[in-house]
Amino acid sequence: MIKQRSQCKLKTVGFSAQDIEGFAAIHQTEIPDGFLSSLGQEALRLVYSEIAENQNCIVVAGIQEEEAKPVGFIVGTLDCAAFYRDFLKHKGLTALKVFLPRILSRTRLRKAFETLLYPTKRRGPAFSSAEILNFAVQPACRGTGLAQALFLELMRRFRARGVKQVKIVTGEEQGRAQRFYEKMGAKRVGWTSVHKGQNDSIFLFELR
């Protein structure tokens, strides 16, 4: 168990198969109600393998030095629509084989289309194309400063890419996440609905 963040190092490049396996496992346990988690580990590994390689994505991972495995990560994208296009281009055939048996229900099929269509939803003039896609930290590492370190490193890397503001979409039930973003300085600017019947808050973090 990590007691201090000094036992973790941040990693931003050169992700291994073990790292990707770790991202998938953390996602499934820490975001259990998300659509991707409902598709299973193989689907999550496929998504994170593209994220780790994609030029439109920025990944910052917290690696436990003793066991050399991820204990938390944050994923940002410069353009969600471009990332989805790249995923379909690079992993489309494999994704079809992996996802299809899992989405053969009306609800999951609808959510799959809603996820793909999310980037096309109308945005207000203040909304940025850069945004946080996923953010998860294992419970044992909460309160150690790791989450803040991951967030700030991602913002630093966004800034280095010329990004001025970052969008963050969170479900209304994600009170802990919303409090964290507000503590870090993000401002709630509106609402959206990624999936039918679900209300999501939109936050913006200004990069100064």
Image (spheres, helix red, strand yellow):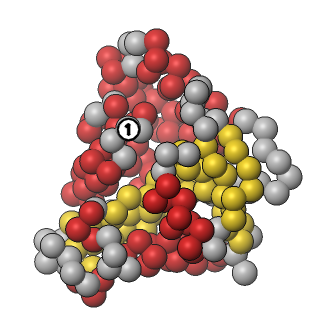
Q: Is 46 on the left-hand or right-hand side of 108?
A: left
Q: Position of residue 179 (x, y in %)?
A: 53, 64
Q: Residue at x 26, y 84 (%)?
A: 4
Classify mark 1: helix, strand or loop: loop
Q: Extreme right residue here?
A: 125
Instruction: Examine the rendered structure and indicate whether residue 200 appears above or below residue 177.
Output: above
| Crowdedness near tag 1: few (<14), some (14–19) or many (≥20) residues, C-alpha within 10 Å | few
Q: Residue at x 45, y 76 (%)?
A: 148
Quadrant in the picture for the N terminus: bottom left
How many numbered discs?
Answer: 1
Q: Position of residue 24 (x, y in %)?
A: 30, 48
Q: Position of residue 170 (x, y in %)?
A: 55, 50
Quickly name the residue at label 1. 33
Can residue 76 be seen at all in this image of the molecule? no
Q: Residue at x 63, y 74 (%)?
A: 185
Check disc 1 and give the amino acid type.
Answer: Asp
Q: Position of residue 40 (x, y in %)?
A: 28, 34
Q: Residue at x 78, y 38 (%)?
A: 122
Q: Is 101 on the left-hand or right-hand side of 133?
A: left
Can residue 26 be seen at all in this image of the molecule? yes
Q: Is 93 on the left-hand or right-hand side of 121?
A: left
Quadrant in the picture for the C terminus: bottom right
- Residue 99, located in which quarter of the rendered image? top left
- Residue 194, located in which quarter of the rendered image? top right
Instruction: Examine the rendered structure and indicate whether residue 116 appears above or below residue 56.
Output: above
